[in-house]
Amino acid sequence: MGAVAAGGRLDVVVSARAEIVPVMRCGLEQVRARIAAGLEPVGVRELPVAEALGATLAVPLRAATPLPRVDTAAMDGYAVAGPGPWWRVHEQVGYAGRACSVVLAPGEAVRIATGAATPLGTTATLRDEHIVTTVVSGKPVVLRAPDAPVRDDTRRQGENWSSGTELAASGTRVSAALVSAALSAEAETVTVRGPLRADVVMTGDEIRAVGPLGPGETRDSLGPVLPEFLRCCDIESTGLWHLADERDLLRSWLALKSHADLVVMVGATGRGAADHLRTLLADLGARIVVDRVAIRPGGSTLVAQLPDGRVLLGLPGNPLAAVAALLAVGPAVIDALTLRVPGPTMWGRLSDAGVMAGEATRIVPVQQQTGGVWRSTGPAHTPHLAGLIGCQALAVLPPGTGRGTLVELLPLPR
């Protein structure tokens, strides 16, 4: 009877664990697909272009004016009319940003600076290297140099683009280059989704941000630098909070009014005695989009949509696991929320990877070597980020990865 009772208890324990632990942990590509299909995008808004860096275009960016707006000199030299020589040289000089009252007739020229609008009557702009000047009867004369090519250094109106030209399609990330192009095109505002903002929470009774460490406590070595890793995913941190491992405290914090788009929570994502997030999300009626990912480190990562519309990205408590999960999953969350067209994936070949066994994808820090190959820096220790020192990326190593395999690289912030 004792054996039967013991066996019965074991069955009960196994059954209980089966209810808690998911039957399947999703691979990284499946997780990204679930995020793309499962998250509702944020709303559209119009922003001054300089404030939209890191957002995603909701409508195409179009030029409001041609570029150049008028014909301009591409080089310092002379604006001329007719085939030359040019017997009359006007005393006035054409400068960029200043009006020029000269009107050229055939056989006339005027000194002009780079970027200046060419005067009426101009048929060509000649750069200084292609002309010679002389004096005839006490007056300056401009001639084309004997060996100079016959060319025109005028930038014609609309040479780069005409008014209404599409400069970037919807779904494009608002980069520094896009902002610059929009300003050149006199597009003062853009219609975008984002930039996205996140309230960042570090959980754990043992985590101490300031002051001497007590017994069993550990320094918060991730919170101060996490905004840098978030920023490389185009997530701006609104602030950092430290919360103890208390269910009611976590519930109260989530109930606070916020204008952020996301909650990035570090810790509380496991299934230990002090991890309350999953049961709390169930009580709140949150919709779980991703529950665990088949990656190491970072397997306890989860993605959920809260009842108020915010997206919760739950990251493991260990620093390296949190960073690995963020860089592996975070961009997919941003793409889904802003309807961004995913950017190109960075790839590289590993010089030293042994065959990766097991069902989980490994994520390891790597350094780029001479010749463009990549080398791992050895076993990754999750309680700290020392393993990232000198590394330029994290390599994603699916099962079966071996030496020379082409693998996905997740760039690290500089």
Image (cartoon, rainbow, N blue to C red):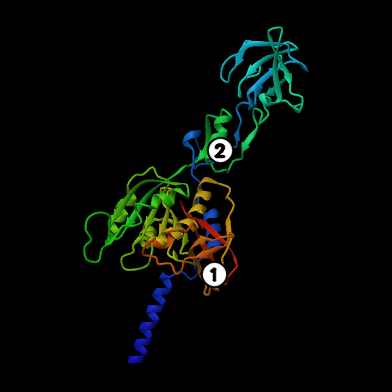
| Residue 211 x %, y % | 22, 55
The structure residue drawn at horizontal position 50% and vertical position 62%, both measured from the top left corner, is: 366
| Residue 302 x %, y % | 44, 60
Circle 2 crowding by C-alpha within 10 Å: few under 14, some 14–19, many from 20: some
Badge number at residue 178: 2
The structure residue drawn at horizontal position 36% and vertical position 56%, both measured from the top left corner, is: 222
| Residue 115 x %, y % | 60, 24
On screen, residue 10 above or below 270: below
Q: Quadrant of residue 300?
A: bottom left
Q: At label 2, which amino acid type do we have?
A: Leu
> Label 1 to label 2, Cα distance in Å?
39 Å
Q: Residue furthest top?
A: 137
Circle 1 crowding by C-alpha within 10 Å: few under 14, some 14–19, many from 20: some
Of residues 27 and 116, which is closer to you in this image?
A: 116
Badge number at residue 381: none
**Mark 1 element type:** loop
**Mark 2 element type:** helix
Q: At label 1, which amino acid type do we have?
A: Asp
| Residue 163 x %, y % | 64, 27
Mark 1 vs mark 2, foreground winner is: 1
Badge number at residue 352: 1
The structure residue drawn at horizontal position 53% and vertical position 75%, both measured from the top left corner, is: 357
Location of the N terminus (image quadrant): bottom left
Of residues 77 and 223, which is closer to you in this image?
A: 77
On screen, residue 149 above or below 78: below
The structure residue drawn at horizontal position 52% and vertical position 29%, both measured from the top left corner, is: 188
Is residue 102 visible in this depiction of the protein? no
